Image: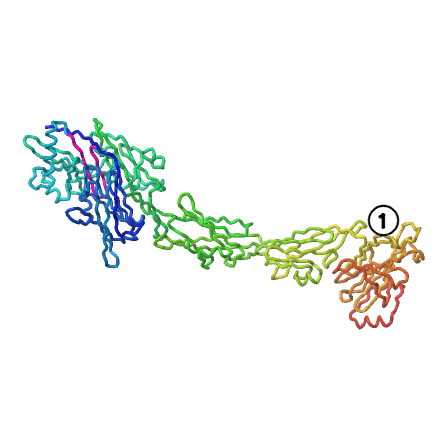
Amino acid sequence: MAFVFCLGVSLLLSVWSTAKCSGVPDGALHMECRDRYFMIAVDLSFTGDEPLFEAVDGTGVYAITRWYAAQCGYSVRLLPLLGHVELRASYFSCHTDNKDDEVFLFNFYLTVTREGREDSYALNKTCSPSLPWSPREITCEENYMEVSVRSEVACPARTVKDDWSALKPAHSSTTSDWQVTFQRNEKQLPPMALSDARKKGYAFGLTDGRLVFRTPYGQPESFSTEVNGVPLEEVHATLFSRQSWVVLMVDLVTACSIYEGSYDDRGYMVWRTPEVPYRSLHGTQLNIGLNGELVAQPVAEDRRFVVGNINSTVQISIPLTAEGGYRKSFVLGDLVEIYVFHLYLEQILADEDLVETRVRFQRTLSTPLLPHPVFTENQTVVDELSFTVYLGDVPEDMELVAVHLNGDEFTVQFMNTRSHNITKVVHPNNTLGYILKVPFDDPVVLLQFSDDAVLHYELNINYTLTILPENESFYHLTSVMAFIDASPPAFDAICSKSGISFSLDHRPYDSLWEISIGSDLLTPELAAKHGYIMSNDSQSLQLMVPLFSHGYKYNGVTLQGFNGTFKIFMRDHETSEVESSTIKSCPFSTNELILCSTLGRLTVVADMSLAIPSGGRPARFNLVDKFCGARETNGTRALFSFPINTCGTTIKLSMGNVTYQNEIFYSGSSQVHTDAVERVMVQCTYPLASLYRLFTTFRFESDTAGIGNIIHTAQPISDMQSLTIKPTAALQTTPASPAVARMHADHPSTRYIKVPSFHKLASVKRKSTRIQAK
């Protein structure tokens, strides 16, 4: 006998809900009506780890245990990654008040235990499905399978009505002739009464328009198969009743994929189910989503889901970065992570008459523990004189709390108040980065100076990260080094009319050298002594050396000008050995100039304009020795350069000094012209303490340069004025000093005169002896 059932559905689409929850803190509870189930989510911070849900109806209160949930259409899950406990209740669950399959009223108690005291909270909500019911709907939940059908039999309407009316008492009556039979591995099992089936965990329900069958997974009458490598659990149940000469049969076959999912190391979580789990049906549509929200396949693919059909198997690949997924970090020696996805999948199938069957899957998929290494990158630019280290790929559920730098601990919240600092970077892929900057001159940095003149900077870093909210610590160590050629500092120098300006930008390692002028260290005291203008701060050193200050060397003297050279030495701070120097030569010009070298050479540029008699032609100039003429003249100015023991130079000795003096004459005459305005005398004075010998015809030695004077004298001689150049000051005019003793400097037969002490000089003064040339 063949029976044909015509399935159809006609429901008004509407959503109406009310909710009541007394005493649950705001924000700790979320209740929502979904397309085929009602969902409650409560924060674990409120419930603790052992909350209890109870279903309430007119017959009493029923604790929803694990076994009872699978029988009655409930699914309870603790979700620590989300921080809440979740209850899903089928619209056809045991204690739901169903009104015409359109309005469903849910009543629950939530019992929470705190410090040994139990508190219960009433949770109520009314829902209406957002989609019309299909003729056949199958739900593959985490812990049970459920099938509901709505039937219109293609036979006389009276028979159909009577048949369904006869089924209602069979739902609850132990005397009903309704029975169920199971087929397992193609073997028909003996029929059993519905009451016996309920005792074994099966549930049967009859609403105004639908017949519902529910079974937990792993029942004795179920069986496992494999289709194209995908494991399935199937239950072939047939509900039947004999009514007179008519046998009414309802096929309640259900099959669900129990594939647990697999991880694809390309970054996907994969789940599979047969394309058509039921014979005589074909697939028409797939809807995919996470956390109970479905979208069409093209929309899911736009979100980087990969949907494929391989050997008649639907394969869903969920990217690890999919919105709606969850990840969690753990420390198991190394840093690891796990990704969890709550997959919601809907297959829409149809038979040859286009009668629709909807199959929905709720599956929790999790990856294995995956390594999640953080990394550091040395981004140091040596020219910036600072370490820059990037810590990257830090998960979003971790934070950096402290950093150890060469053993010294610094908490992140206080690091930016010091010379080193931490900057947090948030990336679009939900990872964090931290940029650490530590100057080379920070006290925590290790510094070594190698024999090959290279500075080694080293920074050993230990990052302390914690996993939130557990505050579990994870440590990441790295070491970075930087190398700098330890060249001595070099000044920049600029010429000006008044002298030479030196500038030096400080480097952290400049303390390895000392700066000196000659053999004297450059200090504020030395600068003040010699008239240098110096400023020194943490950034730079500025030194202005006026012309004719101590330390200048002069050469290239002409009537047009001369070169002044100043040298600054860099000495090793431990050995005082000179390792480098900065030398700057600049051109200068002046109307008059006199130089007294340490080797006994007098160089003078003198203005002779007032020494030329009226009406005289500026023809020639000479010294006391008329054969010692000017090297260069321009009419009124003359340049001479000669050893001080030649050209008729005389020597004057006074206490502590020796002075060499000569005179410039016009036209070679050694007579003073009565109409000349002035005479021009030149002299060099040396301190006796700096002389090794007064002079010889072959050699002159002095530790310091002499003080030069250009003396313009008028009649009487007591009114004469002098122009003086000293190594420690600029040109100045001073009165001439009276001679104590005179010595001519040209004595070929005399080798040298030693002056070992000042008491011998005193005897020379008493004798006032003139030594004549032989």
| The one of 149 and 429 positioned closer to us in this rendering | 149
What residue type is disc 1 on? Answer: Asn
Most common secondary structure along the magenta stretch: strand
Which residue sits at x=70%, y=53%?
Answer: 500
In which quarter of the view is residue 112 placed? bottom left
The residue drawn where x is 14% and y is 29% is: 153
The C terminus - image quarter: bottom right
Indicate whether 569 appears above or below 128.
below
At numbered mark 1, what does the secondary structure look like: helix, strand or loop? loop
Residue found at x 17% / y 49%: 61
Quadrant, the N terminus: top left
The magenta stretch spans residue 146: yes
Number of dots carrying numbers = 1
Residues in magenta, as a range? 134-152
As for residue 576 lying within the magenta part, the answer is no
Q: Is 622 above or below relative to 75?
A: below
Q: Which residue is mark 1?
A: 634
Residue 118 visible here: yes
Residue 511: image x %, image y %? Answer: 59, 58
Observer-nearest of 199 and 7 = 7
